[in-house]
Image (cartoon, grey):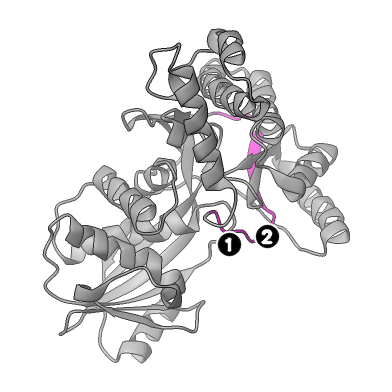
Amino acid sequence: MNTKLLEAYKKSFNTKPLKYFSSPCRINLIGEHTDYNKGLALPAAISKYIQAVVGIRSDRKISLKSLEKSKVVTVDLDNISNKPENRWGNYPLGIFATLQKRGYKLPFGLDIIFYSNVPIASGLSSSASLLDLTAFIASIMYDIPLDKKEIALLAHQSETEFNGLLCGVMDEFAIALGKKDKCILLDCKDNSFTYEDISFQDLSLVVIVSNVRRSLIASPYNKRVEECNSALKIIQKQFDVASLSDIKVSDLPMCRKLIKDDVLYKRVRHIVNENQRVRDFVKASKSGDIRSMIHLLNESHESLRDDYEVTGEYLDYIHEISLKYGAFAERMTGAGFGGSSIALIKQRDFKSFKENLTRDYINKYHIKPTIFLADICDGLSVEDIK
């Protein structure tokens, strides 16, 4: 339990907190931009956390404070709306608005103070972690019977409707339902999932944060969603499909004939091939075929770079120098447009890999990357404060 956070709560609100909550962030091994196309993804929760200490108020106000932010956001439960002046607070506030929209009664307010060691705008889903965390807080504090899957769906509804990001459910699922040393094979068509043991044999998984800040809402993220929807409408004239993820690799030549726009076709090609890469990756792991796993990870980055065009200069440079300095595989993880990458390396080479990559990246961009070994962990947790 974070004693610094407990002391900050007592100092800020002059009352004793009741519960301590924690939410991890996530990486995605493979299956990128497939979630909002009703496809497959293979994420996992990792041990970088947003934590919160929570107490009950005597009025109907939600008061939000973060150790990383100077602004305290206080809003009446009867008057929640997405306002620019709320800034980061719009994410947790959206959860309370969404619950009330669903008809739940929230009879009292809450004081919540947050702390995060997740790099912000890193592509590790700090926003989804904050949303899941707040949904979990609300379910516990208001005694609303939501399981972890329902918490993920509530958080996703809040992000899309209240915050306006046309995202899929993968991030919220990975964080809420994370399990130690397990990846989640998620089918976004029906939100079914299985836990998978993914073996990298003698290789270790490394996370590389570019520390290039970006906002998904302000980035071309929503544009990619629109492009996929436009391509789907064209394809549906010939194919009886509900999403791009219903298209098979063998259908791509016919899709090429239907879609005259080169950009739209490239978007389709990435989604169709990326879904197949997820299937092949899980199969390769089960059979111990590490060479195929390495190939699929690198191929995924190339597809995200060339067909989906979401990697960007910084992540492409990290890909290049990671392979130069000993990574067997490297790919962007998350939405792209900055953010993070993952790599497979020999653990004994981690120190030199980190030093070399950091030096070259700083020399080129005057930005220091954050590099660490990934620890796949459990999802949401709560403790009583004695």
Q: Nearer the viewer, residue 55 or 345?
A: 55
In the image, 44: left or right of 296? left
The total of numbered circles placed on residues is 2
The amino acid type, in three-letter code, at marker 1 is: Pro
Please say if 107 is above or below 9. above
**Residue 217's x, y, as percent?**
52, 55
**Front residue (pair 182, 118):** 118
**In the displayed structure, does residue 316 sit left or right of residue 55?**
right
- Residue at x 18%, y 62% (from the top left corner): 100
Are dots 1 and 2 in contact, CB under 8 Å? yes
Q: Position of residue 207 (x, y in %)?
A: 63, 48
* Image position of 204 (left or right of 346): left
Label 1 residue SS: loop
Q: Which residue has dot 2 on it?
A: 211
- State whether residue 183 appears in this view: no
Which amino acid type corresponds to the residue marked 2 in the rendered image? Asn
Span shown in magenta: 199-216
Q: Quadrant of the C terminus?
A: bottom left
Marks 1 and 2, Cα distance to the nearest angstrom?
8 Å
Near mark 2 (Cα within 10 A), the count class, few <14, some 14-19 or many ≥20, is some
Magenta-colored segment: predominant secondary structure? loop
Where is residue 308, by image quadrant?
A: top right
Q: Taking 81 as reference, is 278 left or right?
A: right
Q: Is residue 193 above or below residue 7?
A: above
First of labels 1, 2 by sequence position = 1
Q: Quadrant of the N terminus?
A: bottom left
Dot 2: what SS?
Answer: loop
- Say which residue appears at 57% left-offset and 22% top-offset: 277
- Residue 153: give x, y in percent of width and height: 30, 46
Q: Is residue 215 magenta?
A: yes
Q: What residue does disc 1 label?
A: 119
